[in-house]
Image (cartoon, rainbow, N blue to C red):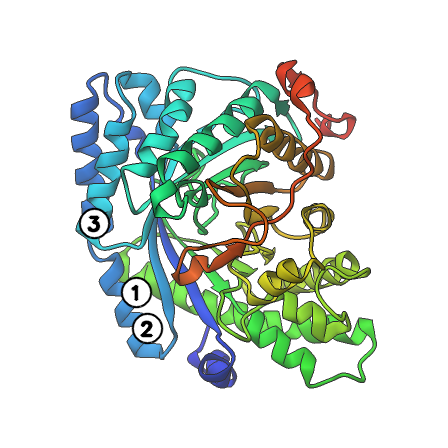
Amino acid sequence: MINTSDILETIHMIQEECLDIRTITMGISLIDCADSDIDRSCAKIYDKICKKAEKLVMTGEDIEKHYGIPIINKRVSVTPIAMLAGVSGNDPVKYAHTLERAARTIGVNFIGGYSALVQKGFSAGDIELINSIPRALAETQHLCSSVNIGSTKAGINMDAVKLMGQKIKEAAELTKDDNCIGPGKLVVFCNAPEDNPFMAGAFHGVSEPDCVINVGVSGPGVVRAAVSKHPEYSIDEVAELIKKTAFKVTRMGQLVGVEASKRLGVPFGIVDLSLAPTPAVGDSVAHILEEIGLEQCGAPGTTACLAMLNDAVKKGGVMASSSVGGLSGAFIPVSEDSGMIDAARSGALTIEKLEAMTAVCSVGLDMIVIPGDTSAETISGIIADEAAIGMVNSKTTAVRVIPAVGRDMGEELEFGGLLGSGPVMKVNTKSPTAFINRGGRIPAPLHSLKN
């Protein structure tokens, strides 16, 4: 049982250290909305989302007022739309417009699930949906998209890797008059989790219930403040401090998730304790690493500090909730973290260093602005490298890079809100084209044979 007294000691964290519930995300299965007629399918989708989630935003706001806990986003994730497109055929962008209309009707911040799972190959609807992603993102505001191109069990689908490099470029071109925001709403995964409440990568997995509530908690400011009070601690003492802090934060998320579940009459799924930063001062994962002892994020020792932080966060969270899932750990999105932005501007943080950090963090290369003339093959090479880290290490990795069309080194893109701003980062220009054009599949590693 959870009592409200469990979160009393976190009130000052909310007021002074940027602690919040980053999102309440309702996952909705659309399997029963599949139809050979795409217009009938879209009508079923709209009706089901509006019925299931009609009180989601209001409930989130009521809980926010009742407990005094900021709930920043209310979101919906749905079954990967490629599955429905495989049944109906026709132009998948019709689904994108339907999801956008539903999101506007129920008032959520984002709706995710314009997605395809192609780690082992393409089935009906997959290629059609992937090819439609740039246009779908350009023609909507609230829609998010993701594609899973690899897994530890299946290996890496290199044909999909090549295709996604092209689609990221196209999405940037189609939204070049809007700060190239299209790729900012598109994630390429390896080992994508099915219960992820965080956009842009959220979708409702096929093994999930018909409808479920997942909660994402964020607290980098809280962890940074706790570490800053104890400069005399050894590293193992710092790890223990972070673990205890993560426990307190997760208890708050568990409370909100259970309460939302009860009020909405929907099963409670998981708490995702992810230190998801914002551009706000003091709400930075990079600043936690600097409090631990780095001159600036990106310095030698950064990967070791991040590994310790990620592990401690997960250990604390697991003890605090009946079900921890999603991406729990520490995020390192460059444009969304004030400390990461500063480190990228100064040159202390490079894409190569970020890639090393992704071996031990929660996700991967996230919200990184790259030169607009970066080739599709180079983007595919970045995706392949990141997917290999995830595949070999049996962890989730992802790529969300944004080609800044018409801009080069020294310039920035300004996205606003939680997405922040990003300096254009240098990319290695040596070509992987011949490798990418081979196609095929990188086989799964030996340790995938666990049956």
User: Residue 156's spot in the image, x, y percent?
Assistant: 63, 25
Above or below, 221 against 451 in this view is below
Q: Which label is found at residue 64?
A: 2
Q: Which residue is mark 1?
A: 60
Closer mark to the observer between disc 2 and disc 3: 3
The secondary structure type at the circle numbered 3 is: helix
Q: Tell me if mark 2 has few (under 14), some (14-19) or many (20+) residues whose alpha carbon lies within 10 angstroms of its own.
A: some
Residue 33 in view in this figure: no
Q: Which residue is mark 3?
A: 104
> What amino acid does circle 3 point to?
Arg
Q: Is residue 332 left or right of residue 263?
A: right
Residues marked 2 and 1 touching at CB (< 8 Å):
yes
Q: Nearer the viewer, residue 405 or 326?
A: 405
> What amino acid does circle 1 point to?
Gly
The count of marks equals 3
User: Residue 160's spot in the image, x, y percent?
Assistant: 54, 22
The secondary structure type at the circle numbered 2 is: helix
The secondary structure type at the circle numbered 1 is: helix
Closer mark to the observer between disc 3 and disc 1: 3
